[in-house]
Image (cartoon, helix red, strand yellow):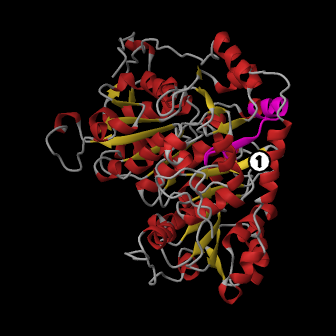
Amino acid sequence: MSTHPTPTDENKHPALSGAKLLLDSLKVQGVDVIFGYPGGAIMPVYDALVGSGIKHILSRHEQGSAIAAIGYARATGRVGTCLATSGPGATNLVTGIADAYLDSVPLVAITGQVPSDLMGTDAFQEVDIFGITLPIVKHSYIVRDPADIPGLIEEAYYIASEGRPGPVLIDFPKDVANAITTERHRWRPYPKVKPEMGTAKNLAAAEELIRSAKKPLFYIGGGIAQGDGVHELRALVERTQIPVVSTLKGLGALPSDHPNFLGMLGMHGLKAANYAVQEADVLIVAGARFDDRATGKLDTFAPHAKIIHMDIDVAEINKLRKANIGIDGSLKKNLAALNPGKLDIQDWQDLCLGRRDQYEWDYDTPVKNIKSEGVYAPKLLHDLTRHAPENAIITCDVGQHQMWVAQHCYFDDPKDHITSGGLGTMGFGIPAGLGAQLACPDRTVITVTGDGSIMMNIQELATLNRYKIPLKIVLLDNGALGMVRQWQEVFFEENYSEVHLYDNPDFAVLARAFQIDAFTVTKGSEVTAGIEKLLAHKGPILMHVKIDQAENVWPLVPPGRSNADMMER
């Protein structure tokens, strides 16, 4: 532990258990919802939870708890909180913790632990969760003294949210939770640093480089939203009229229908976006990290471009691509300060926006080729977000449907699109959706999932029913692990191995067994009525949509190839 508490006068404080101090300290940090699952080592906390004033949501699997806390955090920008017992309870949180780490999500995970004197003895339900999670947390604690708890919790929530956000683990031995104390240790002051903007010298150099460019391009990522820089980005785009491409997590930082927006780049990026990157002469990277799914073969990515890289995490600058100008610090402040003036880039704008119009998606022609007048998933998703309320949130699982959502849904704000980016966690959609819905009860929240992904955390339908969480679920069912099947078709000579889900249950019947309303759509002619029924329903509901197994996601950049080498239908 990085701090050194010191005791204060014990007579000034009431006697409280460690568990009660924990909950009181969480309330001080503004925690109003915890997602969790009880068990032996964490039982003292659950005992104190009754009457605490904190709402607890009982997930049906600890992974669901962690992902629901991520959905809550992603929808609000606040720190999400999850709670589990020791041993398997703690290890079941690990996927969610890793997801939060790779997507820079503020999360505090609290795990019960066996009593201190049994730690290291292979006691019942003991695992070293502190050690297991070291590579996937910003910071971690083992609570040794209940008097440390108020200061420890304050520091943990600050660390989770400051700078580049991420998960923090707190391991809480049972004896410390039960211990009664009248002491409160004064927590040694730790630096609460507000990120500053880059140096005037670097900002001036960036402005000069942008002014000299003939083909400048913004490449934006999830750091825009996490750095509260959406307004500043939009103002800068309006000032400069520079075209914009986005990563998966950057979608919504510029509205999907903004005249300067070319779409998502990368492996399943849109053609106008990928071509623009390959021709740009100055690439202004804001809150993105040159992820392999965005860049394709890195040494062919933006081959003619000088790089301006802006990120709150200085470790990202020059990590994968050498920057001509690196600007660390607050994206909000840096984007606001950057003002290169009026640019002479009309020919470049015309080329980029002309391509966007040229390659605009045709939602009608493919429909004619779908077997038996079936459902064309891109058109369904396009129509879904046109029918949904303006401030609707979409949470998404991982697979073909995830890429179709990124390509075809409309987003007006990055918090409207919640998906697993860096880790690619199947089973993410429903628990993230229920977390987002609890965080934003007055908004419509829609989960788009697949028949492979939904089975990973389908038990959370019970959570939806218990708390009457009005999540709208769109299940695209092609009877296969679609993305793996597509890759086996394209890159493994149609050698299909363990991808067919021919024995799927009837998902509408299964949902109704969980007391969730459900219906099935099998024809394109049924889609509009299905969307209207889905959105009009007051409680949780599942729309089970049968789609053609042979339908693939296009474009597709083959692994190890340049983003310019896009395969098409």
Q: Is residue 142 left or right of residue 83?
A: left
Q: Position of residue 230 (x, y in %)?
A: 73, 35
| Closer to us: 57 or 363 | 363
Going by the numbered disc 1, the residue's amino acid type is: Asp
Q: Is residue 543 left or right of residue 267?
A: right
Residue appearing at x 40%, y 13% in the figure = 11
| Closer to us: 85 or 393 | 393
Q: Check the image and name the residue furthest to the bottom.
A: 372
Number of callouts: 1
Q: Is residue 490 above or below residue 276?
A: below
Q: Is residue 124 above or below residue 319?
A: below
Residue 56 in view here:
no
Residue 149 counted in the magenta span: no
- Mark 1 falls on what kind of element? loop
| Closer to us: 31 or 64 | 64
Q: Quadrant of the C terminus?
A: bottom right
Q: Position of residue 28 (x, y in %)?
A: 55, 28
**In the figure, residue 339 lies in which quadrant?**
top right
Residue 247 counted in the magenta span: yes
Q: Quadrant of the N terminus?
A: top left
**In the figure, residue 233 lies in which quadrant?**
top right
Residue appearing at x 62%, y 64% in the figure = 554
Residue 485 in view here:
yes
Q: Is residue 74 above or below residue 442?
A: above
Residue at which label 1 appears: 412
State the extent of the magenta-drawn residues as a range: 233-251
